Image (cartoon, grey):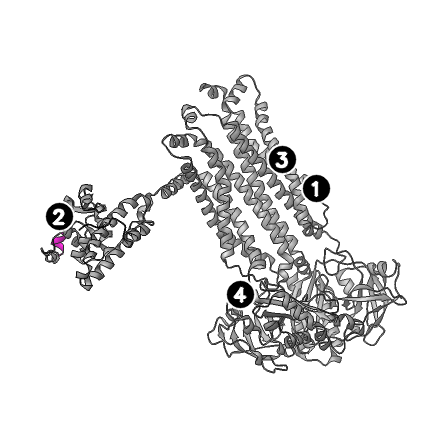
């Protein structure tokens, strides 16, 4: 029986499966199976004669080719690639010192980069964990010119505006609003804060967030005037407060004088809409009056809600903007509060709505830190670059030592490509191990960075779980570093002519000039980059120092802030002033307390502004305002320069009085030395008409909202002249330790009434929290600067020691001819200094570029702060001296007789 | 698995080889084992030195116009191991192949 020798489909299958067979074994394997299958084909020719079982057997037999191929996989161990790997591992184990330095520097470099990228990812890049986040847009006002009242968050809207948007919009398949607040869970004593997320009824459904347990809110939950709304708690709160109890649904717990029933638990990955913050509880917006005890948050003058919508399919952000713009005029007309100040109505009605994509969430943390994080990522990238230069240098040094090995391989017929591959595999191994350790470091580092940003009053939450972006970033870093530090040495070393090397037989050849030049160039690059990092570290440190030594105008040390609430006592309004006075007197009576005062505007945290003009003029200017009680200036040690402090005369019903600062006198009164007796007007706000104030005193300038700003004009009102709320922020100056003062205040409040709640924070901590960004930058830049110095030191030391080793003969001759030890010492040391000087010169333009990039983050420093520049250059010279010392000394120890014996 | 130890399956395959069935496919047919079992077992037996393999002389293959086949044969130590296995697995000799299905070596 003759058959065509063309391949049947079975044979193509064998060729295909053969791909996974180790190449070394492939030809044999293919032949064996081809033969077997041909034998089968012969059987198949008699196919019709076979019974069904045999047919099935034959089919299953052919599947054996695949299993057989799999079985051969372990033999890959002997493949060329695996051989390279095994050889690479052996080489790395042989040079333990080199391997350790390489892996450590890579791990630090990759770890730092990954950690910061994780933060960038969490703060900026990552989408919210909701359904189709890219469809979400925020509806906001183009500007806040017409907005008057209280502002809980930047660019927030009022409740009436939200209602109008909900009823009039056409661009969204679903629209919702949310706002945040803090509630106190403790019935009395020190407060136990919980982060509240108020949401409109459609919030969860529009986002596509389902309850992990129980249910989420629906439209029916959010009906105005709701009396007993259920609460949806976050997964974290469920764990923390209920210990993860399985029967949590239906449980009740009380806060703000009401009992709330848990109706659902949110999924674990849902942290709310704000990146950087999570929530504990969520309630429908209709519950706000219940919790806060008043309707203020539902009024048209409280700006606290963020409105977001999900675009209808086919709608773009631009179309949505056009739609909300077209309804803006009618919408604001309908949402105009009745008591809106007449002067502002025009601006209010002229307000325009717009939409912006909000799939990555809304974040104050992002606004504050995004720029710093990108900058830090650039700095960390430089560190990694330095580490790569360092490794390339070390590998080049090692390459010289392996020249003979490579030459022998070449002589035996190894191709250049094969040799480069072998060398790259070694680099890849280093990069991979470095990346794995680096990823571990990043895990710890990113979490400690988040802890760094945490403050007691504003806990930061960031979802740092690695996603494809982080993994991809780390993998790309590993691959890139491997190429950066591995490729040049690999190409270099394989360029050697095998003959030349082997001819040089037993004698160590001095390195070619060319190769040494490359190594010097790498060192110069390293020095230049290190200089940039060190200068950066000094710049940020000096910027922080500038802020820390600023004149604030008050003395923050020894002052404690206590936030007291006695709403639970339900005092009648007319009793509140005396109750407050009494409370304050008892705090002042505590032993160790020097003075105490009430303030409604906490310096460097709160803000209140108004438009003001001097009586008899029309020149309106912005004025910062504050509401304080008597002895405020004494407590903060702000000097009273003229007139008097507030006292019992300044009561409700008496003519309005104010104390101003020097800057007020400068800006409003042309620098009058004594403004006492002058009068000024404050423009109307919702709920109050234009008001005339008489100045009764002048105090020294103090920082108002931000440490970094210049002194601004401030007017202080007497808090007793306004309607009193059932709470107070008290500043307490004490010459005792903090904790006995805290205990004493708690005791006093408990004596007055156990239902009074209080929270404490040292005034200084509060101020420190405002310069967290500068601290973060200074700390991390300092850390990277030190790392860079260390790497530069290692790099310099490496090239100098290698230089000394390869110049032993030359040094021997010099010494034999009468060179002094000092001459030889400086011969080597001066080389180190030269390398650094060239590096410094090359690095200076880079520093200018860095300063331009970071100018917004630097405080009180010129275009290029000379102190930092010179400091960094000097530090680099010190590094040169340190790194050069050992090799130079080794050079002086060269024994001419020993060195020349080999000639 | 130690070098000297033969599993039942391996012993069965070794026995088939000993009876002159020298190709993978013949062994599958005669033992009824799946190819996914037979081939790995053959490779292991080969590694253990119980089985040697040879390529068919190209001349034979050329006459039959097919690729040369690889055939396996039992080595000396393989025969010893098989004898031990026979003593251990009492039922093994009962699986002697039936003489009607002639192994292909007689063609060669």
Report the Cα–Cα distance between label 1 and label 4: 47 Å
Q: Which mark is residue A193?
A: none
Q: Which residue is mark 2?
A: B107
Q: Main secondary structure of the magenta part?
A: helix
Up-down relation of residue A729 to residue A903 (above or below) = below
> In terms of depth relative to the viewer, which is nearer, A331 or A13?
A13
Quarter of the image where the C terminus of chain A is located: top left
Chain of the residue displaying label 2: B
Q: Which mark is residue A867?
A: 1
Helix, strand or loop status at disc 2: loop
Q: Which residue is mark 4?
A: A129
Q: Which mark is residue A877?
A: 3
- Marks 3 and 4 share the same chain: yes
**Whole-percent x, y for residue A620 in the image:** 84, 65
Chain of the residue displaying label 4: A
Report the Cα–Cα distance between label 2 and label 3: 88 Å
Is residue B50 among what the camera can see? no
């Amino acid at each position: 029986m003759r058959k065509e020798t063309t391949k049947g489909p079975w044979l193509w299958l064998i060729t295909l499966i053969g791909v996974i067979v180790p190449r070394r074994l492939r030809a044999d394997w293919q032949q064996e199976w081809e033969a077997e299958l041909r034998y089968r084909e012969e059987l198949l020719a008699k196919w019709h004669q076979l019974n069904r079982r045999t047919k099935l057997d034959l089919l299953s037999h052919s599947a054996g080719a695949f299993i057989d191929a799999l079985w051969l996989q372990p033999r890959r161990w002997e493949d060329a690639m695996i051989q390279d790997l095994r050889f690479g591992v052996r080489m790395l184990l042989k040079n333990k010192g080199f391997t350790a330095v390489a892996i450590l520097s890579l791990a630090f470099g990759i770890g730092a980069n990954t950690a910061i990228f994780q933060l960038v990812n969490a703060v900026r890049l990552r989408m919210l964990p909701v359904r189709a986040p890219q469809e979400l847009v925020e509806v906001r006002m183009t500007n806040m010119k017409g907005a008057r009242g209280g502002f809980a968050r930047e660019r927030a809207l009022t409740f009436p505006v939200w209602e109008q948007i909900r009823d009039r919009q056409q661009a969204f398949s679903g629209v919702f609003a949310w706002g945040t607040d803090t509630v106190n869970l403790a019935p009395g004593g020190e407060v136990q804060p919980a982060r509240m997320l108020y949401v409109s009824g459609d919030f969860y459904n529009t986002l596509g967030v389902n309850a992990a347990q129980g249910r989420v809110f629906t439209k029916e939950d959010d009906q105005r005037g709701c009396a007993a709304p259920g609460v949806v708690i976050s997964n974290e709160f469920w764990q923390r407060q209920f210990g993860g109890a399985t029967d949590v649904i239906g449980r009740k717990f009380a806060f703000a004088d009401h009992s709330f029933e848990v109706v659902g638990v949110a999924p674990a990955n849902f942290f709310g809409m704000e990146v950087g913050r999570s929530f504990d509880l969520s309630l429908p917006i209709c519950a706000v009056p219940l919790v806060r005890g008043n309707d203020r948050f539902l009024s048209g003058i409280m700006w606290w809600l963020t409105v977001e919508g999900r675009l209808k399919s086919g709608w773009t952000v631009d179309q949505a903007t056009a739609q909300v713009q077209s309804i803006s005029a009618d919408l604001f007309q309908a949402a105009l509060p009745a008591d809106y100040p007449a002067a502002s109505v025009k601006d209010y009605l002229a307000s325009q709505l717009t939409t912006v994509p909000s799939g990555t969430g809304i974040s104050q943390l992002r606004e504050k830190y995004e720029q710093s994080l990108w900058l830090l990522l650039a700095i960390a990238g430089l560190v990694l670059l330095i580490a790569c230069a360092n490794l390339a240098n070390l590998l080049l040094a090692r390459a010289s030592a392996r020249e003979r090995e490579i030459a022998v391989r070449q002589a035996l017929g190894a191709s250049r490509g094969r040799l480069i591959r072998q060398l790259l595999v070694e680099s890849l191994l280093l990069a991979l191990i470095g990346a794995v350790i680096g990823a571990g470091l990043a895990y710890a580092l990113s979490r400690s960075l988040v802890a760094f940003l945490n403050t007691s009053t504003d806990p930061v939450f960031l979802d740092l779980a690695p996603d494809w972006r982080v993994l991809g970033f780390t993998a790309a870093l590993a691959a890139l570093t491997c190429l950066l530090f591995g490729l040049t040495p690999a190409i270099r070393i394989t360029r050697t002519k095998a003959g030349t090397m082997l001819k040089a037989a037993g004698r160590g050849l001095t390195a070619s000039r060319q190769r040494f030049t490359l190594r010097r160039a790498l060192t110069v690059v390293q020095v230049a980059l290190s200089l940039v990092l060190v200068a950066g570290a000094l710049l940020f440190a000096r910027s922080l120092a500038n802020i820390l030594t600023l004149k604030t105008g008050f003395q923050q040390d020894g002052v404690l802030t206590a936030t007291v609430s006695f709403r639970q006592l339900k005092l009648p309004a007319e009793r509140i002033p005396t109750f407050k006075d009494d409370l304050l007197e008892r705090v002042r009576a505590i032993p160790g307390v020097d003075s105490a005062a009430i303030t409604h505007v906490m310096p460097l945290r709160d803000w209140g502004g108004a438009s003001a003009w001097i009586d008899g003029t029309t020149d309106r200017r912005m004025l910062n305002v504050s509401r304080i009680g008597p002895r405020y200036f004494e407590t903060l040690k702000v000097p009273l320069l003229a007139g008097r402090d507030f006292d019992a005369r300044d009561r409700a019903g008496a003519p309005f009085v104010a104390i101003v600062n020097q800057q007020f006198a400068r800006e409003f009164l042309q620098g009058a030395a004594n403004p006492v007796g002058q009068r000024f007007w404050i423009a109307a706000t919702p709920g109050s008409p234009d008001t005339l104030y008489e100045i009764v005193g002048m105090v020294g300038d103090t920082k108002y909202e931000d440490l970094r700003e210049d002194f601004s004009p401030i007017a202080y009102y007497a808090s007793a002249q306004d309607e009193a709320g059932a709470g107070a922020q008290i500043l307490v100056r004490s010459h005792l330790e903090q904790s006995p003062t805290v205990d004493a205040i708690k005791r006093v409040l408990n004596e007055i009434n156990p239902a009074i709640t209080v929270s404490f924070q040292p005034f200084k901590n509060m101020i420190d929290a405002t310069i967290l960004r500068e601290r973060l930058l200074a700390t991390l830049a300092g850390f990277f600067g030190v790392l860079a110095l260390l790497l530069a030191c290692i790099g310099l030391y490496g090239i100098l020691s290698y230089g000394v080793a390869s110049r032993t003969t030359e040094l021997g001759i010099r010494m034999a001819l009468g060179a002094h030890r000092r001459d030889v010492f400086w011969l080597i040391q001066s080389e180190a200094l030269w390398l650094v000087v060239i590096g410094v010169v090359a690095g200076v333009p880079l520093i200018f570029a860095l300063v331009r990039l970071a100018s917004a983050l630097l405080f009180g420093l010129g275009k290029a702060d000379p102190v930092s520049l010179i400091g960094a250059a000097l530090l680099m010279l010190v590094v040169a001296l340190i790194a050069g010392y050992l090799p130079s000394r080794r050079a002086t120890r060269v024994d001419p007789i020993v060195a020349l014996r080999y000639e | 698995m130690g070098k000297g130890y033969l599993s039942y399956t391996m012993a069965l395959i070794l026995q088939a080889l000993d009876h002159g069935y020298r190709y993978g496919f013949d062994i599958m047919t005669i033992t009824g084992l799946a190819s996914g079992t037979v081939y790995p077992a053959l490779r292991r037996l080969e590694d253990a030195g119980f089985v040697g393999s040879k390529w068919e002389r190209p001349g034979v293959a050329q006459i039959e116009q097919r690729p040369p086949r690889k055939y396996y044969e039992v080595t000396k130590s393989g025969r010893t191991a098989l004898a031990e296995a026979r003593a251990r697995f009492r039922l093994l000799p009962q699986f002697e192949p039936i003489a009607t299905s002639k192994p292909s070596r007689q063609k060669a």
